[in-house]
Image (spheres, rainbow, N blue to C red):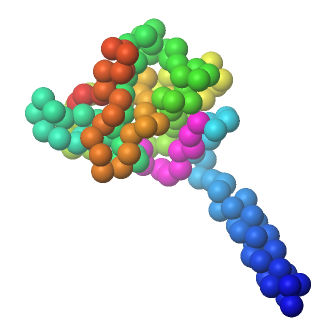
Amino acid sequence: MRDVVLLPTIACFAIALAAQGTFGQSDSGSAQQKGPLQTVIGDNLSLGVNGRGANAYLIGYTGMPVYTYSRDKGSQSTCYGDCALRWRPYMVGAKDDLGLKAGVGGKVGTTTRSDGNLQLTYNGRPLYFYGADKEGEPPAGHNIDGVWHLARP
């Protein structure tokens, strides 16, 4: 009887692993970050705005806030290693649509990171997602260590 229960369990586990390998891959030509940082999937990576007036801040394709790092050197990111694990660079692919949504008046572009991946920039500043931000909650990363700031439209 134990073998009868165990066999379907193993089969379900094998199917789940196979599906994860198949469905976890993107063939859309979007950028895939090396390592565990972030994968960007989709063709429209528009920046949007959350809030109004002085409280407005930019949000990425995930709907989560994006940040700038004051220690970056112009458009070149200086956030790598442990920093990039906590503050995920906003990666994009070379063929991704980098449009802006209504209310975002700045200039969007990209910068090439030292690993060869493209990172989204806004007004020449590299953009990041903060790993501790949670959907439906206020941004948690603004002014951390005095160097991380919400990107403003």
Residue 85 position by quadrant: top right
Magenta residues: mostly which secondary structure?
Answer: loop
Total numbered circles: 0
Image coordinates of residue 91 in percent, x first then y, are: 52, 35
Q: Tell me the residue at 29%/46% (across/down).
A: 137
Q: Of 69 and 40, which appears nearest the observer?
A: 69
In-front residue for pair 133/65: 133
* Residue 121: % across, % down: 41, 26
Q: Quadrant of residue 68?
A: top left
- Residue range in magenta is 37-47
Q: Is residue 22 visible?
A: no
User: Is residue 59 visible in the rendered structure shown here?
Assistant: yes
Residue located 50% across and 52% down the image:
42
Q: Is residue 46 magenta?
A: yes
Q: Residue furthest left?
A: 53
Residue depicted at x 80% and y 85%? 5
Q: Is residue 35 above or below residue 83?
A: below
